[in-house]
Amino acid sequence: MGLLQEFMKINKVWPSRSLKLPYTSLTKLEMFELGYFAASEVPHRCFSIKLNPGNDHLKDVALLYNSSTKQFVSILTHEEGLVITLFESSEDNLANHLVELEAKIKKSMSQLVEKPTDLRDQIIKCILVERKLDEAMHLSLSNEVSRRVYFAIGETRERAALIPIFQNSKGADLVQLALHKWMDMALNLPQDSQFPPEKTKGLVKNFLQIKKWLIELISNQLAGISTLKQETTVE
């Protein structure tokens, strides 16, 4: 059973709690991306996402799953605000997890709103790159054909290359080299055949490392902490 089918089965049965955040001066897209960033820890896997065309971004939705905690997350831009819902098999820690999530997203919102427009845009685009990393991992784990995995990696790399705070951060060169390596590997596979399961483990391990690095970059940028590469001077 795929994760989407499993979610459709449990979402009316498992205990759940929702958080609704009214829209502020941030756009719906910014709210959605911050919700994604707040809800998606390194182990989370995005198994379904739908972004509506145009600038309204009403009813954009993403579904996440954390295999270590058996937690599902729904993120939705509702008419009245951003709605994030947690689903867990037990109610034991559900309330605490929602409180932690609420604190994280409200902190991110207050940090982002204070940033200059250009920096706000770059931070949001970094979260989009995080989503693309998740997409590439999900496709490889879902036994998709190599072509789809290749294009997902390629889009991740290309989008990252256009973000100055990404490209100028410590570790970015190694990240881009890793993405290029996996692009080349995927390109040289039979494009209409399943992405090899023996390659998936290595890809996911590497991409989780990149995701951890990227989450730290975004967190630091939101907090106003420099992520710039150290300049070397010649005396």
Image (cartoon, rainbow, N blue to C red):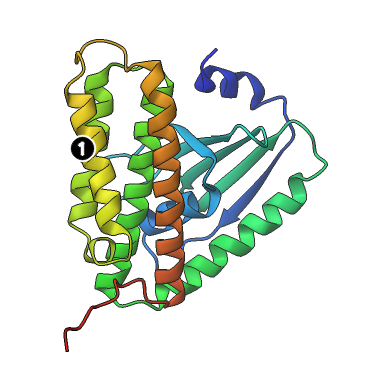
The residue nearer to you, when weighing 44 against 107, is 44
The residue sitting at the front extreme is: 235
Residue type at mark 1: give it.
Gly
Drawn side of residue 70 relative to residue 151, left or right: right
The residue nearer to you, when weighing 208 against 181, is 181
- Structural crowding at the residue carrying mark 1, measured as other residues with C-alpha within 10 Å and reported as few (<14), some (14–19) or many (≥20): many
In this rendering, the count of numbered labels is 1
Q: Secondary structure at mark 1?
A: helix
Q: Is residue 218 above or below residue 189?
A: below
Of the 4 image quadrants, the one containing the N terminus is top right
At which x and y percent is residue 147? 21, 21
Which residue is painted at 36% across and 76% down in the image? 115
Which residue is painted at 62% across and 55% down in the image? 101
- The answer to whether residue 86 shows anywhere in this view is yes
At which x and y percent is residue 213? 42, 55
Which residue is painted at 16% across and 84% down in the image? 234
Drawn side of residue 145 relative to residue 44, left or right: left
